[in-house]
Image (spheres, rainbow, N blue to C red):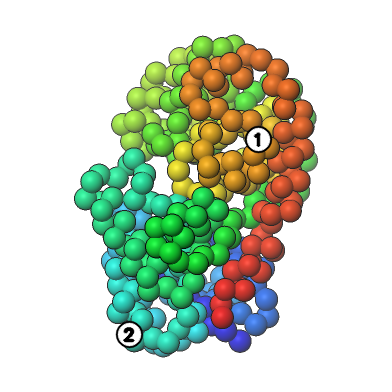
Amino acid sequence: MKRVSIIGTVGLPACYGGFETLVENLVRYKSEKISYHVYCSKSSYKTRPDKVGGAELTYIPFRANGIQSVSYDILSMLHCILFKRSDVVLILGVSGCIFLPFLRLFTKSTIVTNIDGLEWRRDKWGTVAKKFLKFSESIAVKFSDVIIADNKAIGDYVTEEYTKDNEIIAYGGDHAIRKINVESGGKDYAFGLCRIEPENNVEMILSSFSKTNKNLKFVGNWGSSEFGKKLKRTYSRFDNIILLDPVYDLDQLYVLRRNCSFYLHGHSAGGTNPSLVEMMHFGVPIYAFDCDFNRYSTEEKASYFIDENQLISKLNSSDSEFGSNGQAMKEIALRRYTWEKIANLYESTYK
């Protein structure tokens, strides 16, 4: 049996984002030849069991996100060195990868790193943070045995920037489909869901809907930044726009997703986005921001917009591709984005 330690997430049970959902499903769909050991952020859990879903848990006294993520990852790696209990170390994200050269010196474990969505390119980071993250990325690529990219556009970047082979493994989305009864609504609204950040083109989407009579329900963390608060003040006054606070309950999200007429995906960075592949399983048409990441994820079969004028035009017209769009999204999701497939692909890298 191979022992795999996972570093870089908040932990189990999943309570935060895409990486946490990934870990939860790696554990759920693991084969009999794999055992998992997951590092968890102590402050994120009031109760701290020793195991969840068969995975052993170790709690680290730092936050897994923000500036503390560097210390969190490094302390997790030190624990791996001291206890020598891992055949494979799976690192999710590059925050603490400046420590990877030392990890390599003191362990014979296979090191597998998912470099995430080119974090240093995100608009939310300042100049110093971007330089640090770019440096950490370069260290991760150099000192890992296997690099995982969640999108071919990121894989191509790794090949061109570092001349390094990599494995393309996305995320599953079938956990978003729930076994509950839902009253069929009128499907009279479009739906959006994301963290409220400039790179997700939230303002473009809201502004576009404010200039049409189309209804929109948009879920996001509006109160977490001045940017989000400003958008909520500006656009909540429009009768056709409903801005909802974060919804973490998958059953509640299922109802919102199931009853929408189409989905808006404004992400312009970050590779294969979990919320996109989750939505693809619902078989509704998707309007996505026009970038390499989104075109690869949807195999160029969604409908795309590049600016506000183009999105308004699409909202006001009957897109000839609209009918087949949703069917294509579901077919792609079932073929590429199920957790059983993703778990098998990850295990194939644990050599």
Q: Which secondary structure lies at badge 1?
A: loop
Q: Which of the two residues, 155 or 92, is positioned nearer the viewer here?
A: 155
What residue is rendered at 48% in x and 24% in y?
307
Q: Position of residue 21 (x, y in %)?
A: 55, 57
Q: Position of residue 146 (x, y in %)?
A: 49, 72
Tell me which numbered mark, 2 or 1, is placed earlier along the sequence. Answer: 2
Q: Is residue 326 left or right of residue 46?
A: right
Callout count: 2
What residue is rendered at 43% in x and 25% in y?
203
Q: Position of residue 175 (x, y in %)?
A: 66, 53
Q: Is residue 109 left or right of residue 55?
A: left
Question: Label 2: few (<14), some or many (≥20) within 10 Å?
Answer: few
- Identified by mark 2, the residue type is Leu
Q: Is residue 137 placed above or below 299 in the rendered structure?
A: below
Q: Which of the two residues, 340 or 310, is positioned nearer the viewer here?
A: 310
What residue is rendered at 77% in x and 38% in y?
327
Quarter of the picture containing the N terminus is bottom right
Residue 248 in sight in this render: no
Residue holding disc 2 = 105
Circles 2, 1 touching at the beta carbon (< 8 Å)? no
Quarter-wise, where is residue 283 in the image? top right
- Identified by mark 1, the residue type is Ala
Q: Is residue 293 placed above or below 84 in the rendered structure?
A: above
Q: Which secondary structure lies at badge 2?
A: helix
Q: Is residue 197 left or right of residue 53?
A: left
Q: Is residue 112 left or right of residue 28?
A: left
Residue holding disc 1 = 302
Q: Position of residue 260 (x, y in %)?
A: 67, 29
